[in-house]
Image: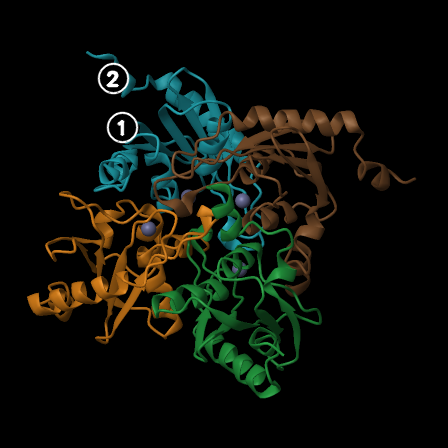
Chain colours: A cyan, B orange, C green, D brown
Amino acid sequence: ATTAEINKHLPDDEVEELIDASLAARKNSYSPYSKFPVGAALLTNTGEVITGCNVENASYGLTVCAERTAVCRAVAEGHRKFRAIAITAEMGEKFVGPCGMCRQTLAEFGLDYEVYLSRPDKTYMKTTVGKLLPDSFNPEWVHFESQ
Amino acid sequence: ATTAEINKHLPDDEVEELIDASLAARKNSYSPYSKFPVGAALLTNTGEVITGCNVENASYGLTVCAERTAVCRAVAEGHRKFRAIAITAEMGEKFVGPCGMCRQTLAEFGLDYEVYLSRPDKTYMKTTVGKLLPDSFNPEWVHFESQ
Amino acid sequence: ATTAEINKHLPDDEVEELIDASLAARKNSYSPYSKFPVGAALLTNTGEVITGCNVENASYGLTVCAERTAVCRAVAEGHRKFRAIAITAEMGEKFVGPCGMCRQTLAEFGLDYEVYLSRPDKTYMKTTVGKLLPDSFNPEWVHFESQ
Amino acid sequence: ATTAEINKHLPDDEVEELIDASLAARKNSYSPYSKFPVGAALLTNTGEVITGCNVENASYGLTVCAERTAVCRAVAEGHRKFRAIAITAEMGEKFVGPCGMCRQTLAEFGLDYEVYLSRPDKTYMKTTVGKLLPDSFNPEWVHFESQ
Ligand SMILES: [Zn+2]
Ligand SMILES: [Zn+2]
Ligand SMILES: [Zn+2]
Ligand SMILES: [Zn+2]
């Protein structure tokens, strides 16, 4: 198996650790308008875990989701390559993917990494950035265009 | 065939009309930063065609894509139900879907309507909102949550 | 008096007409999340009145305010020069300015035009885009930078 | 002098430290589209310095400015009260304020804290969140409305 393939299958204990981190991050959520706290935890390709929570605003359009907070924080800390992200919210019975804004933000840094959609009870559904954003508009395409 | 099914298959002349409208709308694009003009044309369930173009800003985060301009304009004109949207940009050889922001905005008003990704030469690829945003986070789910 | 100066003082009946248009636009507001409908009406330099309402989304960050809807719709209809905007919301006793996103969007197309903050009873406070965004980050500055 | 007043006047060495932190943060900027790196450093009321940089996206509307990255990261780390923010960009001769999106995001957490607009040579202009967003739309007002 290549390293790439290995990277695509996180061991169970790392998945659980990532979900735990997203659950902890959720506690810092600033969501007085939606009252819907969300936490996220990114795993970088060098093994760091970087978390985020949603940060809302009286002007709703300025709301930053947990996933985007995690990505921006990771970039600010010098990371741009990711292996996985776990996202935790209270989602009822169904597993629901991130919003389109977050899918596009995740796709800016790659389409292959894993996305774990989790509930507070730590059950989860696994998918990938690419599956969540088929026929995606991404940096590769922009560069192609400008040639 | 049910009305719903009929609605899902626009006749060729209506598709062409919609693409023409998106091409015309593209001429009003305000895109001094990306230099990448895009046009869009929404077909409402009552047969109106509502167009939009991208509107950029010196603060890039305020950029509104053509698709979102069309949706907001349609809502401002009293429409909330759509049969199809055509989106035209200069895309090279590949057909590329709308950005994640636009997928989510389209999904707010339904998952079943058609999306025509078109080039200036009027060739196109057909898809649907739902296919572009699998496992979507949409209003139905929010309402489910708040029960 | 120069044309510029004349443009800066809308006659009372035009102000009232603009406020009426923003009130009518407010009725189309799609605001199921905030339950806070807002209407806006832009007056172009050629005398057209272009309206907008807020258009919200289950993913709050995709919310487009009434002012931005009006600006994007105006651009899509071929307008980029404005004399005034009226914004109407139910604001209690105080007059409250547009959110920062909207101030920046308005500033993209000029700092000198008038802003009328109005209530449903048509009382209003008058200001300008430039007063609402002091020391602004605007297109002129970006162009200066890139020289 | 009250604590509030003391907080409003950062000692020169703390200002310089904050500007240094924003300069360092600027090095992590992900700005391949604008090629305009920006750094920011927030000082919390408990003395921590939290930095951010701009994080852009192929879909321009997803761009997060340095200031908003810093705020979201601070909230994710458990902070919601701030004494000051330093923002550093290459701005030519003029000092230019943050964009409207960032002014509104800063205002969500208070109007009184200081804003230092700085250049790479560490010269700066001092202002406050409230001065940058007059007649602001902020949480206090939303709460007033909903009573
Ligand atoms: Zn999101
Ligand atoms: Zn888009
Ligand atoms: Zn606004
Ligand atoms: Zn900004």
Chain ID of residue with mark 2: A
Sequence order check: which comes first, mark 1 or mark 2?
2
Report whether residue C30 is seen. Answer: no
- Residue A4, which numbered label? 2
Q: Are marks 1 and 2 on the same chain?
A: yes
Chain ID of residue with mark 1: A
Between C131 and B70, which is closer to the camera in this rendering? C131
- Residue A112, which numbered label? 1
Split into quadrants, the picture shows ligand 1 in the one at top left
In the rendered view, does A133 fall on the left or right side of B2? Answer: right
In the rendered view, does A95 fall on the left or right side of B122? Answer: right
Between B53 and A15, which is closer to the camera in this rendering? B53
Screen quadrant of the N terminus of chain A: top left
In the rendered view, does B121 fall on the left or right side of C93? Answer: left
**Quadrant of res D16:** top right
Q: Are marks 1 and 2 in contact (CB under 8 Å)?
A: yes
